[in-house]
Image (spheres, rainbow, N blue to C red):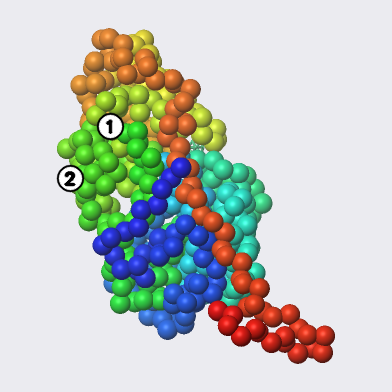
Protein backbone atom coordinates (compact mmCIF):
# COMPACT_ATOMS: atom_id res chain seq x y z
CA UNK A 1 0.00 0.00 0.00
CA UNK A 2 1.16 3.51 -0.73
CA UNK A 3 1.80 5.62 2.37
CA UNK A 4 1.31 9.39 2.55
CA UNK A 5 4.04 11.53 4.06
CA UNK A 6 3.07 15.06 5.02
CA UNK A 7 5.42 17.81 3.89
CA UNK A 8 7.60 19.58 6.40
CA UNK A 9 8.71 22.69 4.53
CA UNK A 10 5.46 24.29 3.32
CA UNK A 11 2.68 25.66 5.57
CA UNK A 12 -0.26 23.23 5.45
CA UNK A 13 -2.74 25.74 3.89
CA UNK A 14 -0.40 26.01 0.90
CA UNK A 15 -0.16 22.28 0.29
CA UNK A 16 -2.21 20.06 -1.94
CA UNK A 17 -1.91 17.19 0.55
CA UNK A 18 -3.64 19.34 3.18
CA UNK A 19 -3.86 18.49 6.85
CA UNK A 20 -5.86 15.24 6.67
CA UNK A 21 -4.89 13.40 3.49
CA UNK A 22 -6.23 10.04 4.67
CA UNK A 23 -9.86 11.14 4.67
CA UNK A 24 -11.99 12.55 1.86
CA UNK A 25 -12.67 16.22 2.47
CA UNK A 26 -16.30 17.35 2.36
CA UNK A 27 -17.53 20.80 1.37
CA UNK A 28 -17.82 22.04 4.97
CA UNK A 29 -14.21 21.09 5.76
CA UNK A 30 -13.05 22.62 2.50
CA UNK A 31 -14.87 25.89 3.18
CA UNK A 32 -13.53 25.95 6.75
CA UNK A 33 -10.01 25.84 5.29
CA UNK A 34 -10.65 28.89 3.11
CA UNK A 35 -11.92 27.12 -0.02
CA UNK A 36 -14.65 28.42 -2.32
CA UNK A 37 -13.97 31.97 -1.13
CA UNK A 38 -14.20 34.77 -3.66
CA UNK A 39 -11.46 37.14 -2.47
CA UNK A 40 -9.33 36.79 -5.62
CA UNK A 41 -10.96 37.80 -8.92
CA UNK A 42 -10.08 36.14 -12.26
CA UNK A 43 -7.73 38.86 -13.52
CA UNK A 44 -5.96 39.12 -10.18
CA UNK A 45 -5.66 35.32 -10.03
CA UNK A 46 -4.16 35.20 -13.51
CA UNK A 47 -1.61 37.83 -12.46
CA UNK A 48 -0.69 35.79 -9.37
CA UNK A 49 -0.29 32.62 -11.44
CA UNK A 50 1.93 34.42 -13.93
CA UNK A 51 4.03 35.95 -11.16
CA UNK A 52 4.44 32.66 -9.31
CA UNK A 53 5.41 30.78 -12.48
CA UNK A 54 3.07 27.86 -11.77
CA UNK A 55 3.73 25.05 -14.26
CA UNK A 56 1.32 22.30 -15.28
CA UNK A 57 1.63 19.00 -13.40
CA UNK A 58 0.40 16.59 -16.04
CA UNK A 59 3.88 16.06 -17.46
CA UNK A 60 4.71 18.86 -19.90
CA UNK A 61 5.33 21.52 -17.20
CA UNK A 62 3.80 24.22 -19.43
CA UNK A 63 3.24 27.60 -17.69
CA UNK A 64 -0.32 27.58 -16.34
CA UNK A 65 -0.96 31.29 -16.88
CA UNK A 66 0.06 31.09 -20.55
CA UNK A 67 -2.27 28.14 -21.12
CA UNK A 68 -5.19 29.91 -19.43
CA UNK A 69 -4.60 33.08 -21.44
CA UNK A 70 -4.37 31.14 -24.72
CA UNK A 71 -7.85 29.70 -24.17
CA UNK A 72 -9.33 32.97 -22.89
CA UNK A 73 -7.99 34.97 -25.82
CA UNK A 74 -9.61 32.71 -28.42
CA UNK A 75 -13.11 33.39 -27.02
CA UNK A 76 -15.95 31.41 -28.59
CA UNK A 77 -17.46 29.80 -25.49
CA UNK A 78 -14.47 27.88 -24.15
CA UNK A 79 -14.59 24.60 -22.26
CA UNK A 80 -12.50 23.57 -19.25
CA UNK A 81 -11.53 19.99 -18.42
CA UNK A 82 -10.04 18.63 -15.19
CA UNK A 83 -7.88 15.78 -16.41
CA UNK A 84 -7.55 13.11 -13.72
CA UNK A 85 -6.73 10.16 -15.97
CA UNK A 86 -3.39 9.01 -14.64
CA UNK A 87 -1.76 6.71 -17.17
CA UNK A 88 1.72 6.40 -15.67
CA UNK A 89 1.88 3.18 -13.64
CA UNK A 90 4.23 4.72 -11.05
CA UNK A 91 1.97 7.68 -10.26
CA UNK A 92 -0.87 7.78 -7.73
CA UNK A 93 -1.26 11.49 -7.02
CA UNK A 94 -4.13 12.37 -9.39
CA UNK A 95 -6.41 9.55 -8.26
CA UNK A 96 -5.58 10.30 -4.63
CA UNK A 97 -6.40 13.98 -5.18
CA UNK A 98 -9.79 13.28 -6.77
CA UNK A 99 -10.64 10.78 -4.04
CA UNK A 100 -9.44 12.87 -1.09
CA UNK A 101 -9.85 16.51 -2.14
CA UNK A 102 -12.48 16.67 -4.89
CA UNK A 103 -13.60 20.15 -3.79
CA UNK A 104 -10.09 21.53 -4.21
CA UNK A 105 -10.06 20.30 -7.82
CA UNK A 106 -13.61 21.53 -8.54
CA UNK A 107 -12.79 24.92 -7.03
CA UNK A 108 -9.74 25.10 -9.30
CA UNK A 109 -11.88 24.12 -12.29
CA UNK A 110 -14.40 26.89 -11.49
CA UNK A 111 -11.53 29.39 -11.11
CA UNK A 112 -10.08 28.32 -14.46
CA UNK A 113 -13.54 28.72 -15.99
CA UNK A 114 -13.81 32.23 -14.58
CA UNK A 115 -10.41 33.17 -16.01
CA UNK A 116 -11.07 31.72 -19.47
CA UNK A 117 -14.78 32.62 -19.68
CA UNK A 118 -15.67 28.94 -20.07
CA UNK A 119 -19.33 28.03 -20.34
CA UNK A 120 -19.07 24.39 -19.27
CA UNK A 121 -16.65 21.97 -17.66
CA UNK A 122 -15.79 18.31 -17.41
CA UNK A 123 -13.98 16.08 -14.96
CA UNK A 124 -12.30 13.30 -16.93
CA UNK A 125 -11.17 10.17 -15.09
CA UNK A 126 -11.07 6.39 -15.12
CA UNK A 127 -11.00 5.59 -11.40
CA UNK A 128 -14.53 4.63 -10.24
CA UNK A 129 -13.84 5.59 -6.59
CA UNK A 130 -12.66 9.03 -7.71
CA UNK A 131 -15.73 9.31 -9.96
CA UNK A 132 -18.10 8.62 -7.06
CA UNK A 133 -16.33 11.16 -4.81
CA UNK A 134 -16.41 13.85 -7.50
CA UNK A 135 -20.11 13.28 -8.18
CA UNK A 136 -20.84 13.51 -4.46
CA UNK A 137 -18.82 16.73 -4.25
CA UNK A 138 -20.72 18.22 -7.21
CA UNK A 139 -24.02 17.43 -5.49
CA UNK A 140 -22.77 18.87 -2.20
CA UNK A 141 -21.53 22.14 -3.68
CA UNK A 142 -22.91 22.76 -7.20
CA UNK A 143 -20.35 24.71 -9.25
CA UNK A 144 -21.18 28.02 -10.96
CA UNK A 145 -21.14 26.35 -14.41
CA UNK A 146 -22.43 22.98 -15.65
CA UNK A 147 -19.82 20.29 -14.92
CA UNK A 148 -20.10 16.70 -16.12
CA UNK A 149 -18.02 13.69 -15.10
CA UNK A 150 -16.77 11.68 -18.10
CA UNK A 151 -15.30 8.27 -17.42
CA UNK A 152 -12.89 6.43 -19.67
CA UNK A 153 -11.05 3.12 -19.62
CA UNK A 154 -7.67 3.24 -17.90
CA UNK A 155 -4.83 3.34 -20.44
CA UNK A 156 -1.39 4.94 -20.77
CA UNK A 157 -2.49 7.23 -23.60
CA UNK A 158 -6.04 7.99 -22.39
CA UNK A 159 -4.92 11.12 -20.52
CA UNK A 160 -3.11 12.69 -23.48
CA UNK A 161 -4.93 15.96 -24.16
CA UNK A 162 -6.22 15.15 -27.65
CA UNK A 163 -7.38 11.72 -26.42
CA UNK A 164 -9.27 13.53 -23.65
CA UNK A 165 -11.06 15.75 -26.16
CA UNK A 166 -11.84 12.82 -28.44
CA UNK A 167 -13.34 10.76 -25.60
CA UNK A 168 -15.47 13.64 -24.27
CA UNK A 169 -16.78 14.14 -27.79
CA UNK A 170 -17.94 10.51 -27.78
CA UNK A 171 -15.01 8.86 -29.56
CA UNK A 172 -12.29 6.51 -28.33
CA UNK A 173 -9.72 7.82 -25.82
CA UNK A 174 -6.95 7.85 -28.43
CA UNK A 175 -4.63 10.72 -29.39
CA UNK A 176 -5.07 12.61 -32.64
CA UNK A 177 -2.51 14.40 -34.79
CA UNK A 178 -1.64 17.97 -33.78
CA UNK A 179 -2.36 20.73 -34.74
CA UNK A 180 -5.00 21.65 -33.91
CA UNK A 181 -4.31 21.54 -30.20
CA UNK A 182 -7.27 21.62 -27.80
CA UNK A 183 -6.76 25.31 -26.99
CA UNK A 184 -7.40 25.97 -30.69
CA UNK A 185 -10.18 23.46 -31.31
CA UNK A 186 -11.20 21.09 -28.57
CA UNK A 187 -14.41 19.69 -27.11
CA UNK A 188 -17.26 20.27 -29.59
CA UNK A 189 -14.90 22.44 -31.63
CA UNK A 190 -14.59 25.04 -28.83
CA UNK A 191 -11.26 26.27 -27.44
CA UNK A 192 -10.58 23.91 -24.56
CA UNK A 193 -8.36 24.03 -21.50
CA UNK A 194 -7.30 20.49 -20.59
CA UNK A 195 -5.65 20.86 -17.21
CA UNK A 196 -4.18 18.27 -14.89
CA UNK A 197 -6.06 18.01 -11.59
CA UNK A 198 -3.00 18.91 -9.49
CA UNK A 199 -2.55 22.08 -11.57
CA UNK A 200 -6.18 23.00 -10.87
CA UNK A 201 -5.69 22.28 -7.17
CA UNK A 202 -2.74 24.69 -7.13
CA UNK A 203 -4.83 27.31 -8.93
CA UNK A 204 -7.49 27.00 -6.20
CA UNK A 205 -4.86 27.25 -3.44
CA UNK A 206 -3.39 30.35 -5.07
CA UNK A 207 -6.84 31.96 -5.23
CA UNK A 208 -7.53 31.19 -1.59
CA UNK A 209 -4.14 32.35 -0.29
CA UNK A 210 -2.36 34.59 -2.78
CA UNK A 211 0.31 35.37 -0.19
CA UNK A 212 1.40 31.73 -0.36
CA UNK A 213 1.45 31.73 -4.16
CA UNK A 214 5.17 31.05 -4.52
CA UNK A 215 5.13 28.13 -2.09
CA UNK A 216 2.04 26.76 -3.87
CA UNK A 217 3.62 27.10 -7.31
CA UNK A 218 6.94 25.59 -6.28
CA UNK A 219 5.60 22.66 -4.31
CA UNK A 220 4.99 19.40 -6.10
CA UNK A 221 3.33 16.10 -5.36
CA UNK A 222 5.69 13.18 -5.93
CA UNK A 223 5.03 9.45 -5.92
CA UNK A 224 8.14 7.59 -4.82
CA UNK A 225 8.65 3.87 -5.35
CA UNK A 226 11.26 1.24 -6.08
CA UNK A 227 14.32 -0.20 -4.35
CA UNK A 228 12.14 -2.52 -2.30
CA UNK A 229 10.69 0.31 -0.19
CA UNK A 230 6.94 0.80 0.22
CA UNK A 231 5.62 3.48 -2.18
CA UNK A 232 5.07 6.95 -0.77
CA UNK A 233 3.03 9.95 -1.89
CA UNK A 234 4.44 13.19 -0.55
CA UNK A 235 4.80 16.88 -1.38
CA UNK A 236 8.11 18.73 -1.55
CA UNK A 237 9.45 22.13 -2.64
CA UNK A 238 10.68 22.01 -6.22
CA UNK A 239 14.31 22.72 -5.28
CA UNK A 240 14.53 19.44 -3.36
CA UNK A 241 17.20 17.17 -4.80
CA UNK A 242 16.59 13.64 -5.96
CA UNK A 243 19.20 12.52 -3.42
CA UNK A 244 17.22 14.07 -0.56
CA UNK A 245 14.11 12.33 -1.87
CA UNK A 246 15.98 9.02 -2.07
CA UNK A 247 17.11 9.41 1.54
CA UNK A 248 13.58 10.20 2.64
CA UNK A 249 12.46 7.10 0.75
CA UNK A 250 14.97 5.02 2.71
CA UNK A 251 17.36 4.46 -0.19
CA UNK A 252 20.46 6.52 0.70
CA UNK A 253 22.57 4.46 -1.70
CA UNK A 254 20.27 4.64 -4.73
CA UNK A 255 22.02 3.73 -7.97
CA UNK A 256 19.77 5.97 -10.04
CA UNK A 257 16.11 6.42 -10.87
CA UNK A 258 13.43 5.97 -13.48
CA UNK A 259 12.01 9.46 -13.87
CA UNK A 260 8.65 11.01 -14.63
CA UNK A 261 6.80 7.74 -14.59
CA UNK A 262 8.27 6.21 -17.71
CA UNK A 263 8.61 9.46 -19.61
CA UNK A 264 11.80 10.90 -18.08
CA UNK A 265 13.93 7.82 -18.74
CA UNK A 266 16.72 6.55 -16.51
CA UNK A 267 19.30 8.59 -14.63
CA UNK A 268 22.35 7.33 -12.78
CA UNK A 269 23.58 8.20 -9.28
CA UNK A 270 25.37 11.35 -10.50
CA UNK A 271 22.01 12.87 -11.41
CA UNK A 272 20.71 12.49 -7.88
CA UNK A 273 22.06 15.95 -7.02
CA UNK A 274 19.68 17.55 -9.53
CA UNK A 275 16.86 19.67 -8.08
CA UNK A 276 13.28 18.85 -8.99
CA UNK A 277 13.00 21.83 -11.31
CA UNK A 278 11.76 21.39 -14.87
CA UNK A 279 14.53 23.42 -16.51
CA UNK A 280 17.38 21.80 -14.55
CA UNK A 281 16.03 18.33 -15.25
CA UNK A 282 15.48 19.10 -18.94
CA UNK A 283 19.06 20.36 -19.25
CA UNK A 284 20.20 17.00 -17.87
CA UNK A 285 18.08 15.14 -20.43
CA UNK A 286 15.36 14.00 -18.06
CA UNK A 287 12.01 15.18 -16.68
CA UNK A 288 9.88 14.96 -13.56
CA UNK A 289 6.76 14.53 -15.73
CA UNK A 290 3.84 13.63 -13.51
CA UNK A 291 6.09 13.50 -10.43
CA UNK A 292 6.63 9.74 -10.30
CA UNK A 293 10.16 8.66 -9.36
CA UNK A 294 11.17 5.01 -9.11
CA UNK A 295 14.53 4.63 -7.42
CA UNK A 296 16.97 1.91 -8.34
CA UNK A 297 18.40 0.10 -5.34
CA UNK A 298 22.13 -0.68 -5.35
CA UNK A 299 21.48 -4.29 -6.31
CA UNK A 300 18.90 -3.59 -9.02
CA UNK A 301 19.63 -3.92 -12.71
CA UNK A 302 18.95 -0.80 -14.78
CA UNK A 303 18.64 -2.91 -17.94
CA UNK A 304 15.91 -4.97 -16.30
CA UNK A 305 14.09 -1.79 -15.21
CA UNK A 306 14.31 -0.37 -18.73
CA UNK A 307 13.00 -3.67 -20.12
CA UNK A 308 10.02 -3.60 -17.74
CA UNK A 309 9.22 -0.02 -18.74
CA UNK A 310 9.55 -0.66 -22.47
CA UNK A 311 7.38 -3.79 -22.24
CA UNK A 312 4.72 -1.73 -20.51
CA UNK A 313 4.84 0.92 -23.23
CA UNK A 314 4.69 -1.68 -26.01
CA UNK A 315 1.62 -3.23 -24.40
CA UNK A 316 -0.08 0.15 -23.90
CA UNK A 317 0.45 1.59 -27.39
CA UNK A 318 -2.75 2.70 -29.09
CA UNK A 319 -1.76 0.93 -32.33
CA UNK A 320 -2.68 3.90 -34.48
CA UNK A 321 0.74 4.88 -35.85
CA UNK A 322 2.68 2.18 -37.67
CA UNK A 323 6.03 3.58 -36.60
CA UNK A 324 4.98 3.42 -32.96
CA UNK A 325 3.73 -0.17 -33.18
CA UNK A 326 6.94 -1.42 -34.78
CA UNK A 327 9.32 1.00 -33.00
CA UNK A 328 8.07 0.46 -29.45
CA UNK A 329 7.99 -3.31 -29.96
CA UNK A 330 11.54 -3.25 -31.35
CA UNK A 331 12.85 -1.33 -28.31
CA UNK A 332 11.00 -3.66 -25.93
CA UNK A 333 12.22 -6.80 -27.72
CA UNK A 334 15.82 -5.59 -27.76
CA UNK A 335 15.78 -4.79 -24.04
CA UNK A 336 14.12 -8.09 -23.22
CA UNK A 337 16.80 -9.90 -25.26
CA UNK A 338 19.47 -8.10 -23.24
CA UNK A 339 17.93 -9.26 -19.96
CA UNK A 340 17.77 -12.84 -21.16
CA UNK A 341 21.40 -12.88 -22.28
CA UNK A 342 20.40 -13.60 -25.89
CA UNK A 343 20.90 -10.18 -27.44
CA UNK A 344 22.43 -9.70 -30.85
CA UNK A 345 25.92 -8.07 -30.63
CA UNK A 346 24.52 -5.05 -32.54
CA UNK A 347 21.74 -4.42 -30.01
CA UNK A 348 23.47 -1.37 -28.52
CA UNK A 349 23.79 0.18 -31.98
CA UNK A 350 20.14 -0.54 -32.76
CA UNK A 351 18.99 1.04 -29.50
CA UNK A 352 21.11 4.12 -30.17
CA UNK A 353 19.68 4.48 -33.67
CA UNK A 354 16.09 4.13 -32.45
CA UNK A 355 16.67 6.57 -29.60
CA UNK A 356 17.65 9.20 -32.18
CA UNK A 357 15.30 8.38 -35.03
CA UNK A 358 11.96 7.59 -33.37
CA UNK A 359 11.13 10.69 -31.27
CA UNK A 360 8.42 12.92 -32.71
CA UNK A 361 7.14 10.37 -35.21
CA UNK A 362 4.03 9.22 -33.33
CA UNK A 363 0.79 11.09 -32.65
CA UNK A 364 1.51 11.12 -28.92
CA UNK A 365 4.44 10.90 -26.53
CA UNK A 366 4.45 7.13 -26.03
CA UNK A 367 6.91 6.46 -28.82
CA UNK A 368 9.11 9.30 -27.50
CA UNK A 369 9.05 7.66 -24.08
CA UNK A 370 10.23 4.33 -25.52
CA UNK A 371 12.99 6.03 -27.50
CA UNK A 372 13.98 8.12 -24.48
CA UNK A 373 14.19 5.03 -22.35
CA UNK A 374 16.61 3.40 -24.77
CA UNK A 375 18.75 6.52 -25.10
CA UNK A 376 18.86 7.23 -21.38
CA UNK A 377 19.87 3.63 -20.60
CA UNK A 378 22.79 3.86 -23.02
CA UNK A 379 23.80 7.26 -21.65
CA UNK A 380 23.48 6.54 -17.94
CA UNK A 381 24.43 2.86 -17.79
CA UNK A 382 26.72 2.00 -20.72
CA UNK A 383 28.73 -0.48 -18.61
CA UNK A 384 25.75 -2.67 -17.64
CA UNK A 385 24.50 -2.64 -21.27
CA UNK A 386 27.91 -3.89 -22.47
CA UNK A 387 28.00 -6.51 -19.73
CA UNK A 388 24.57 -7.83 -20.81
CA UNK A 389 25.95 -8.32 -24.32
CA UNK A 390 28.72 -10.60 -23.13
CA UNK A 391 27.18 -12.67 -20.34
CA UNK A 392 23.74 -13.37 -18.82
CA UNK A 393 22.86 -11.04 -15.94
CA UNK A 394 22.23 -12.94 -12.68
CA UNK A 395 19.87 -10.22 -11.38
CA UNK A 396 17.76 -10.35 -14.55
CA UNK A 397 17.82 -14.15 -14.48
CA UNK A 398 16.37 -14.11 -10.97
CA UNK A 399 13.61 -11.63 -11.87
CA UNK A 400 10.33 -12.87 -13.34
CA UNK A 401 9.81 -11.02 -16.64
CA UNK A 402 6.02 -11.35 -16.46
CA UNK A 403 6.01 -9.20 -13.31
CA UNK A 404 7.31 -6.10 -15.09
CA UNK A 405 4.09 -4.07 -15.03
CA UNK A 406 3.31 -5.13 -11.47
CA UNK A 407 6.79 -4.00 -10.37
CA UNK A 408 6.16 -0.55 -11.85
CA UNK A 409 2.61 -0.10 -10.59
CA UNK A 410 1.93 1.98 -7.49
CA UNK A 411 -1.44 1.64 -5.71
CA UNK A 412 -3.48 4.69 -4.70
CA UNK A 413 -3.12 5.58 -0.99
CA UNK A 414 -6.06 4.67 1.22
CA UNK A 415 -8.53 7.50 1.84
CA UNK A 416 -11.57 6.95 4.00
CA UNK A 417 -14.84 8.52 2.84
CA UNK A 418 -15.84 11.84 4.41
CA UNK A 419 -17.41 11.48 7.82
CA UNK A 420 -21.21 11.37 7.70
CA UNK A 421 -22.64 14.46 9.35
CA UNK A 422 -23.67 13.74 12.94
CA UNK A 423 -27.37 12.98 13.35
CA UNK A 424 -27.94 16.10 15.44
CA UNK A 425 -26.65 18.42 12.71
CA UNK A 426 -30.02 18.54 10.89
CA UNK A 427 -32.66 17.73 13.47
CA UNK A 428 -35.75 16.10 11.99
CA UNK A 429 -38.88 18.21 12.05
CA UNK A 430 -41.33 17.59 14.86
CA UNK A 431 -44.84 16.48 13.90
CA UNK A 432 -45.91 20.11 14.28
CA UNK A 433 -43.32 21.15 11.69
CA UNK A 434 -40.98 22.76 14.22
CA UNK A 435 -37.42 21.50 14.66
CA UNK A 436 -37.02 19.13 17.55
CA UNK A 437 -35.03 20.66 20.42
CA UNK A 438 -31.41 19.59 20.60
CA UNK A 439 -30.78 17.95 24.00
CA UNK A 440 -28.68 19.96 26.39
CA UNK A 441 -25.09 18.89 26.56
CA UNK A 442 -24.96 17.72 22.94
CA UNK A 443 -21.49 18.65 21.65
S1 LIG B 1 2.38 7.22 -30.96
FE1 LIG B 1 1.81 5.12 -30.42
S2 LIG B 1 0.55 5.33 -28.60
FE2 LIG B 1 0.68 7.35 -29.54
S3 LIG B 1 -1.12 7.49 -30.86
FE3 LIG B 1 0.53 6.67 -32.14
S4 LIG B 1 0.33 4.43 -31.95
FE4 LIG B 1 -0.86 5.35 -30.32
- Please name whichever residue, 255 or 204, is drawn nearer the observer in this view of the structure: 255
Q: Position of residue 93 (x, y in %)?
A: 44, 52
Q: Does residue 211 lie above or below 242 as drawn?
A: below
- Please name whichever residue, 40 or 211, is drawn nearer the observer in this view of the structure: 211
> Residue lying farthest right?
431
Residue shown at the point (40%, 70%) measured from the top left: 205
Find numbered disc 2 in the image and state the secondary structure of the residue it sits on.
helix
Q: Does residue 319 lie above or below 189 as drawn?
A: above
Residue 425 visible? The answer is yes
Find numbered disc 1 in the image and state the secondary structure of the residue it sits on.
loop
Q: Position of residue 224 (x, y in %)?
A: 35, 44
Residue 266 visible? The answer is no
Residue shown at the point (50%, 40%) measured from the top left: 156
Tag shown at residue 273: 2
Q: Position of residue 21 (x, y in %)?
A: 44, 59
**Residue hosting label 1:** 297
Q: CA separation, marks 1 and 2?
A: 16 Å
The answer to whether 155 appears left or right of 288 in the picture is right
Nearer the observer: mark 1 or 2; the answer is 1
Which callout, 1 or 2, points at the residue further toward the start of the chain? Answer: 2
10 Å crowding of disc 2: few (<14), some (14-19), many (20+): few
The answer to whether 15 appears left or right of 23 in the picture is left
The C terminus is located in which quarter?
bottom right
- Please name whichever residue, 408 or 425, is drawn nearer the observer in this view of the structure: 425
How many marks the image carries: the answer is 2
Residue shown at the point (35%, 67%) measured from the top left: 12
10 Å crowding of disc 1: few (<14), some (14-19), many (20+): many
Tag shown at residue 46: none
Q: Does residue 309 lie above or below 108 as drawn?
A: above
Amino acid sequence: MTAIRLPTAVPTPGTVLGAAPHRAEDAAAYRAGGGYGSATGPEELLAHLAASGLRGRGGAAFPAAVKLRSVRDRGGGPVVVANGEEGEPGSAKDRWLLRARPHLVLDGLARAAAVTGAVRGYVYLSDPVAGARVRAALAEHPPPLPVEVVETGHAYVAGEETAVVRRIDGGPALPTAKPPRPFERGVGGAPTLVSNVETLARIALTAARPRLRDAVAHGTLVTLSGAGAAPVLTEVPSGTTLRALARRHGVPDAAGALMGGLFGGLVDARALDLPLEPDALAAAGTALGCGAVRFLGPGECPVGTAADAAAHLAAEGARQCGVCVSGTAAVADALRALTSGRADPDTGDHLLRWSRGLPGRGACGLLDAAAGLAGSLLRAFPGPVRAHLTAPCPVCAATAPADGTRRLTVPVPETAPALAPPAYATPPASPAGNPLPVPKGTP
